[in-house]
């Protein structure tokens, strides 16, 4: 029996990187996947084909996760196309790193809107469906810097810390209806974005990690499978660090 057989998940920001790894891992476990990205381009179409090849229903939706009305529309469409929404992975995110003295208002607003407001938008949009079902698992992709902070990332850290507070509040609000809410705090994960860092910077990071390696998108996706499945039926309001021991 596959761990997510017969369930439907929404994964935001899933055309590539960690989001795509989560979508693929979910499909391997028998989960139908609705995924969103800012535009449905060739990469997104390719992701849809790869998911369908695993024998599940999959569809990509163009969505600006930071836009409230757009999110309402997209989730209504997904609910119609897929009948149920069992898992929501709030993964859409951006960075605009710079020291506070140089940070513009636009850089602050963009990161807060895409990273944090999107979590409000999607969680609010799926809430009626999950309340009717009296079940659901919401997983918010935070970060170790949302717990410990990081110089040059005041906007990103604030957005990721905000997610953790939101996660706990929703766990308290919706727990009595069988809806769980948890956050994941990835550490140094090797993706396209971090892959562009100079080798010496990567080596420096790895030296600080007790497990002496960067994480993979699959390391994060496996925790999403756990939180989306009934294996975690009694886990809610938690932040799980996936960081090789970097943050303790």
Image (cartoon, grey):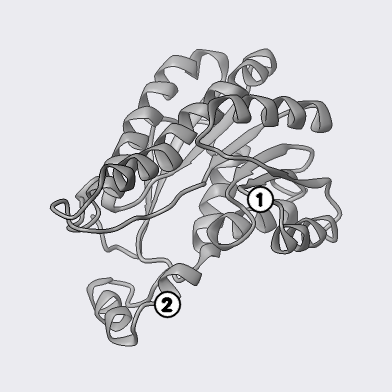
| Nearer the observer, 1 or 22 | 22
**Which residue is pictured at 54% across the width and 26% down the height?**
68
Q: Which residue is mark 1?
A: 39
The answer to whether 28 appears left or right of 127 in the picture is: right
> Which secondary structure lies at badge 2?
loop
The crowd level at tag 1 (other Cα within 10 Å; few <14, some 14-19, many 20+) is some
The answer to whether 111 appears left or right of 36 in the picture is: left
Q: State the separation of the CA atoms marked 1 and 2.
A: 23 Å
Can residue 67 be seen in the rendering of this structure?
yes
Q: Disc 1, disc 2: CB below 8 Å?
A: no
The mark lying in front, picked from 1 and 2, is 1
The answer to whether 78 appears left or right of 71 in the picture is: right
Percent position of residue 148, x then y: 20, 50
Percent position of residue 168, x then y: 36, 27
Q: Which residue is mark 2?
A: 196
| Nearer the observer, 10 or 64 | 64
Residue placed furthest toward the left: 101
Residue placed furthest toward the bottom: 199
Instruction: Say which label, 1 or 2, has the lower sequence index.
Output: 1
Answer with the quarter of the image where residue 159 lies. top left
Percent position of residue 63, x then y: 63, 40
Percent position of residue 183, x then y: 42, 40
């Amino acid at each position: 029996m596959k761990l997510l057989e017969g369930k439907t998940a929404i994964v935001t920001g899933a055309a590539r990187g960690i989001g795509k790894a989560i979508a693929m891992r979910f499909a391997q476990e028998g989960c139908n996947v609705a995924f969103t990205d800012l535009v449905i381009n060739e990469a997104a179409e390719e992701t849809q084909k790869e998911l369908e090849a695993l024998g599940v229903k999959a569809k990509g939706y163009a969505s600006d996760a930071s836009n409230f009305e757009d999110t309402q529309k997209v989730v209504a469409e997904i609910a119609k196309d897929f009948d149920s929404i069992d898992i929501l992975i709030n993964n859409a995110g951006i960075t605009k790193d710079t020291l506070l003295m140089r940070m513009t208002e636009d850089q602050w607003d963009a990161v807060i809107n895409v990273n944090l407001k999107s979590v409000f938008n999607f969680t609010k949009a799926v809430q009626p469906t999950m309340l009717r079902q009296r079940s659901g698992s919401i997983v918010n992709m935070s970060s170790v810097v949302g717990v410990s902070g990081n110089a040059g990332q005041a906007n990103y850290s604030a957005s990721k810390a905000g997610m953790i507070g939101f996660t706990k509040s929703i766990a308290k609000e919706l727990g009595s209806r069988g809806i769980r809410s948890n956050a994941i705090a990835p550490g140094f994960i090797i993706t396209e974005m971090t892959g562009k860092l100079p080798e010496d910077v990567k080596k420096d990071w790895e030296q600080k990690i007790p497990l002496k390696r960067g994480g993979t998108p699959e390391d994060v996706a496996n925790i999403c499978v756990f939180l989306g499945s009934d294996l975690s039926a009694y886990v809610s309001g938690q932040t799980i660090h996936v960081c090789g021991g970097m943050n303790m």
